[in-house]
Image (cartoon, rainbow, N blue to C red):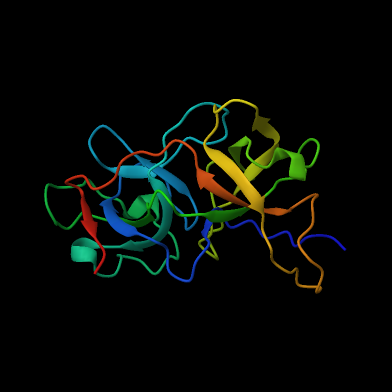
Amino acid sequence: MANDDFPRGLVPLSLRPLGIHYYRASTGADIFIGDSVNRNASGLVGVSSAATIGVEQLLGVAVGFAGPRKAGTATDDPYLDASDLTTLATGLETGDRFIAVADDPNQEFYIQEDTGGTALSLLEIGAAIAVVYRTAGSGNTTSGFSQSEIDASGFVTTTAAQLQIIRRHDNINADGTYNAVGDYAKWVVKILHRQDGGAANAAPIV
């Protein structure tokens, strides 16, 4: 039977991710659970460009959000709405919004494969793979999940991509069949080029 089609970006492979830190969010784009993120020159964190093959450092993956002083966000949205990102002031002020990022270098994630090109096979284990958005630059505003997937036609034999394929994910579809090679297959991956965390704009979760 067919694999479940349920894009939700990068999902940490553990009951509790190995490491989570809060980072101040950058303005300009909505941020969804499961988005790969990186830090800009100002130390603020936003969605990575993705959708391209090339070396791009990633800080980690968004797994939650918080508002000023890491309390609730200004809206009830299950994602960080760009309209809620006012001008970020210095320190923990009214405009601050935070992203909880799974940023441990040993963290593994699973992610869904798209349907473009030839489906990935077990021969691609170990290869570098690019991220692509099903709907460009956005996620599901109802569920709050990212619409990012790995690009079946975007694996390379060099290291010029964001992720590395580790193995096929051992999970079961809604109809009771096992996750299989083919459209919408789920794969375990790790960040290939990692951006260091722990800057002044980060704070460890407590």
Identified at 49% across, 66% down, the residue is 14
Asked whether 6 or 179 is in front, the reply is 179
Q: Is residue 45 visible?
A: yes
Q: Position of residue 99 (x, y in %)?
A: 33, 56
Q: Residue at x 66, y 33 (%)?
A: 155
Residue sitting nearer the eye, 105 or 133: 105
Asked if residue 191 is positioned above or below residue 175 in the image, the reply reads above
Residue 59 point in image, percent of width and height:
37, 44
Left or right: 145 in relation to 185:
left
- Picture quadrant where residue 42 is located: top left
Q: Residue at x 30, y 65 (%)?
A: 74
State the count of labels. 0
Q: Position of residue 23 (x, y in %)?
A: 27, 52
Rendered-image quadrant of the C terminus: bottom left
- Where in the figure is residue 47, as x and y percent of width and height? 43, 43
Residue 68 versus residue 197 in the image, above or below: below
Quadrant the N terminus occupies: bottom right
Residue occupying the point 45% across, 31% down: 56
Q: Is residue 58 left or right of residue 42?
A: right
Is 33 on the left or on the right of 83, as rendered? right
Left or right, 167 with reference to 50: right
On the question of residue 120 being in view, the answer is: no
